[in-house]
Image: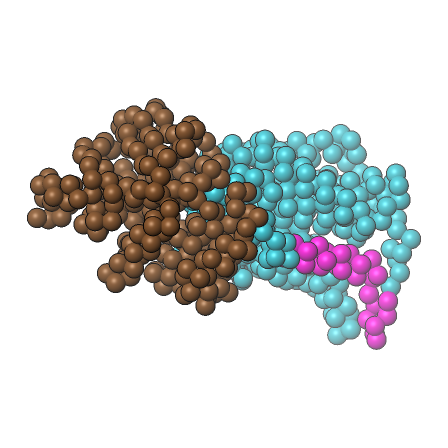
Chain colours: A cyan, B brown
Amino acid sequence: MTFPLFAEVFLKGILTGLVYGLMALGLSVIFGVVRVVNFAHGEFAVLAMYAAFVLFGLYKVDPIIASVPVAFAFFLIGYGLQRTIVQPFVTRPQHEQFILLVGLALVLVNAMLMVFGPESRQVDLPYSLDTWMIGPLMIDKVRVYGALAALVVTAALFAFFRFTLTGTAIRAAADNLVGAAVVGLDVKKLYALSFGVGLACVGAAGSIMTALTDMTPMLAPSYTLLAFTIVIVGGLGSMAGALGGGLLIGAAEAVASAAISPSMKSMVSFGLLVIVLALRPQGLFGKAES
Amino acid sequence: MLAIEEMDVFYGDAQALSSVSLEADAGEIVAIVGANGAGKTSLIRAIAGMLKPARGRIAFKGAEIGGLDSFRVCNLGVGQVAEGRQVFPSLSVHENLLTGGMLPRARARRAQNLERMVALFPRLGERMSQAAGTLSGGEQQMLAIARCLMGEPELVMFDEPSLGLSPALAQSVLETIGELNKQGLTCLLVEQNVAASLELAGRAYVLENGAITLTGSGASLLADDRVRQAYLGM
């Protein structure tokens, strides 16, 4: 592979990786605060893709713009889910939480199969084939727009956690749950907000991905696995880790599929997962459990 | 201000408290004395709403609070400085204080309360942007007290505030509690340093195996042979 081609593929992977990172960030936020693993994460990603697909079909809303209303709707869905079915499972054993969320995942996939069918769908954006030439490098415009949108949402999320009182309270609850009860924080509400924020991330990411790739309900489990791989490589519960993991996995998959073969990309990301688990089980950006 | 009547509390099948009755009037320091495992922390957590009593009543300023969620109890003015300090280690000192000031009852006066805490604990003022986990034990205890006061409590329950501190620091924490009490704060004090807490307290209760076995003024319990033998080693 020539250097310009490598650079082009690498850049493409980084841009996609930012969107992956945003999706994985949602998983990380939910786990970091509520301590429940969202096994339906990829299903929500694909649901967001179909939401953007429908918005495009009905109102010609650009999927990248649609990430805003879809994220908002997913926030409400997440808030409601936590308040109703997830909250009673928070203090129950992990295998029961697993069954709840895998069950939810199955319901979502099959509902999408019923409504949209198994065939692959896509949106035809007027600029989907436009490119920029930067020196010898050819860059897809749509990928740049998608990455920028993911970056804006991620930055907004960091600002929310860093600079708002509610964000500070959520970090406090993630940091020390007993402490949160002691100072009188409404932990159940913070959990619901966190699940909402987590689903808003995956809603925005799924919506943006609609502009980049085809969708079918059967893709959902592979997105769940992708999000898991990213947060484990980056460090579970670490926001920077989700983003860094997204970039790494995005770039590695793009390079592997161009350099070897497209079917090799999963092998490369799972290979990275195994290496990280063996050498640094807390993830690249994670703190070791004390 | 606080009145508990015949309260039972269970941890799973194990009974932590049986038929505990206790009162604290406005402006008092009431000490709870007892060995490890006697149920002192269970008592505080039950009042705070972190454990649900199986039986009995807990009234705060005349209103029943037994079984309310902890954030509702806090918002009525029942603060807690928990055992082990329970600060948020990865949050800054400033952010820790903010979390204490988020109670609806105190939210509007957050800025003034923050200034008040810096005046009360200048050491915290110097370390506002430092992560709470990097503070010394004494500083963390100051932070836990200041964080609680940010919520403008009327009653504060102190659970082992001098645990793990040097004798000098322990003394200064107890002096701080005495000072806050003089300013009108009602205090419930659970303290392993029995002699010091009985000296500070107007009244005290002795808790043994989850039940109140003795009660009286701090001075009378200090003079009581049973207390002297069991807790003061005399």
The residue depicted at 59 percent of the width and 36 percent of the height is A82
The residue depicted at 65 percent of the width and 44 percent of the height is A199
Segment tinted magenta in the rendering: A132-158
Can you name the residue that lies furthest to the right here? A126
At which x and y percent is residue A206? Answer: 73, 47
Q: Is residue A63 above or below residue B168?
A: above
The residue depicted at 63 percent of the width and 46 percent of the height is A198
Q: Is residue A69 above or below residue A158?
A: above
Residue A126 drawn in magenta: no
Q: Quadrant where the N terminus of chain B lies?
A: top left
Q: Is the magenta stretch mostly helix, strand or loop?
A: helix
At which x and y percent is residue A12? Answer: 75, 63
Front one among B153 and A141? B153
**Which quadrant would residue A70 be assigned to in this image?**
top right
The residue depicted at 41 percent of the width and 42 percent of the height is B154
Front one among A158 and A287? A158
